[in-house]
Amino acid sequence: MCGLCLPHCPTFKLTGTESHSPRGRVTLARALDQQPALRTEASYREALESCLQCRACERVCPAHVRYGEIIEGARALLARAQAPSATTRLLSWTAAHPAASTLAIGIAGSVARLLPLPGRAAAQVRRARWPIALSADDQAPLALFVGCVARAFESAAQAALLGVAHRIGAKLTTLSGLGCCGAMDRHLGLTQAAQACTAHNRTRFAAAEVRTLLALDSGCIDALRRGLVGDADAPQVLEACRWLLQRASDWQPLLRAPQRRERIGLLLPCSHRNVVGDVDAVRSLLATLADVELVEVPMGLGCCGAAGPHLLAHASAADAYAAPIVAAMLNLRLDALATTNVGCALHLEERLRAARSPLLVRHPVSFLAERLAVLK
């Protein structure tokens, strides 16, 4: 293995250790496959579970090594080797019970905003809002994927997209009965649970005759597309900004002039840059808005550190990854920050509050909805 990916790996840049590089982790994954006794070794587990799965290495690999699949396979071996942690059980339950979990998170968010509760968890959950209502329609040719935790933490962005769709006369349905996209379980090595989520959603898509599925979160988009590979009747999964650009002629004449010029920072998540692609759609959507100065935020070590369950399991490391990004945002003197990943938004907003910054982290769609006067 050549090692060309090492300078692109956030964990290698942070630690400087071979075992925390893509090359080192591929070696560890091979050893786990060949020597089952190693699957309970703490050092192996720490090295493999601390991977952010940002897949920057995969994007630059000249041999096109499918690193993401290798890490998922290694984590599946680790998950089967010993009992899951309390954090793993909580996250998996949350993904498996989206209706109950988003309701609980929404309530917790309301409480946290009313009471000055201390601590990181309280600061993070303040972002949660009441989940948007789901449609009772049996048929949904154009549907919005609301996800699991995103239904609470990105409720405002989902409401914004629905508002824009309504304003331009597009019937966008919040399809009920869907589960998690499966990304969380894949991060945790719970392959069977992820496959169950995928199978459940595919059945629901088919029953509702979904032809186009819109998604706001970059991590969900990747998981949904992977889950639908090989299904000739599967809906097309579109990133929301791309769909809005396709309908630009419908909403551009309706834009109202902003009250003031805004300096908006754009943070492009790892999952969007390295996996989903088409980041130009996000840039282009924001660039169409009058009196917006768009500034791309430097990514520091290459990732903010949220990375699915990484934020909970490796909080100190997550803070270290976020630190240079937050510093850059503060130096840029932004009016707002836009990003397309709920984990990034959750983590960075909490880190900004810890730095005593009032900067809000929003989905790009929210800025468009604001200029169309569809936000309450």
Image (cartoon, rainbow, N blue to C red):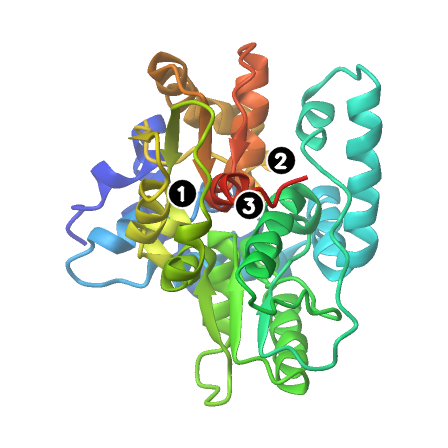
Residue at which label 1 appears: 269
* Disc ID at residue 102: none
Residue at which label 2 appears: 312
* Left or right: where 245 falls relative to 172: left
Q: Nearer the viewer, mark 2 or mark 1?
A: 1
Which residue is rendered at x = 20% and y = 55% of the image? 61
Looking at the image, which is closer to me, 114 or 14? Answer: 114
> In the rendered view of the protein, which quadrant contains the C terminus?
top right
Q: Position of residue 117 (x, y in %)?
A: 80, 17
The three-letter amino acid code for the residue at tag 1 is: Pro
The three-letter amino acid code for the residue at tag 2 is: Leu
Residue at which label 3 appears: 308
The three-letter amino acid code for the residue at tag 3 is: Gly
Find numbered disc 3 in the image and state the secondary structure of the residue it sits on: loop
Task: Give the alpha-carbon distance from disc 2 to disc 1, as whole Å.
Answer: 18 Å
Of callouts 2 and 1, which one flags the residue occurring earlier in the amino acid sequence? 1
